[in-house]
Image (tube, rainbow, N blue to C red):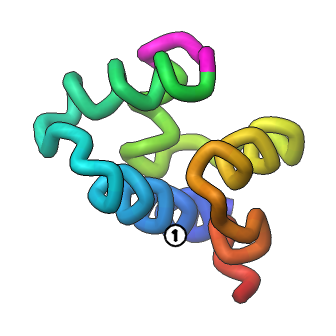
Amino acid sequence: MQQSAKYFATRLNSCLDDTGAPIHARERAAVLSKMINIPKQQAWTLLEGHQLPNSDLIQKIAIEFEVDPEWLIGNK
């Protein structure tokens, strides 16, 4: 579980890099929080690889960044 959360975080950060999001973790979490309408603390835990989101949130993130949800969680 922990490894998949880290992998997800790497992919999520890559998506944010592509949008030109700030590099600083706190600012990046604020941007993600606004993009997908989640609390900043939850955004930070996702970006740091401390938590793997549920399937609904994975789907929402995939739609937001126009990527395959399976790619986001490391299955592709």
> For residue 39: magenta?
yes
| Quadrant, the C terminus | bottom right
> For residue 2: magenta?
no
Which residue in the structure is indicated by mark 1? 7
Dot 1 alpha-carbon crowd within 10 angstroms: few under 14, some 14 to 19, many 20 or more: some
Q: Which range of residues does the magenta coloring cover?
A: 37-41
Residue 66 lies left or right of residue 48; in this view the side is right
Residue 23 lies left or right of residue 4; in this view the side is left
Figure check: 29 above or below 5: above
Figure check: 71 above or below 65: below
Q: Residue 40, position in %: x, y? A: 43, 15
Q: SS of the residue at dot 1?
A: helix
Q: Residue furthest right?
A: 56
Quarter assignment of residue 1: bottom right
Q: Residue 60, position in %: x, y? A: 75, 40
Residue found at x 34% / y 19%: 30
Residue found at x 41% / y 65%: 10
Residue found at x 52% / y 26%: 35
Figure check: 17 above or below 36: below
Q: Residue furthest bottom?
A: 76
Residue 63 lies left or right of residue 24; in this view the side is right
Predominant SS along the magenta part: loop
Quarter assignment of residue 2: bottom right
Residue found at x 77% / y 73%: 70
Q: Residue 6, position in %: x, y? A: 48, 62
Amino acid under label 1?
Tyr
Camera-side residue: 27 or 7?
Answer: 27
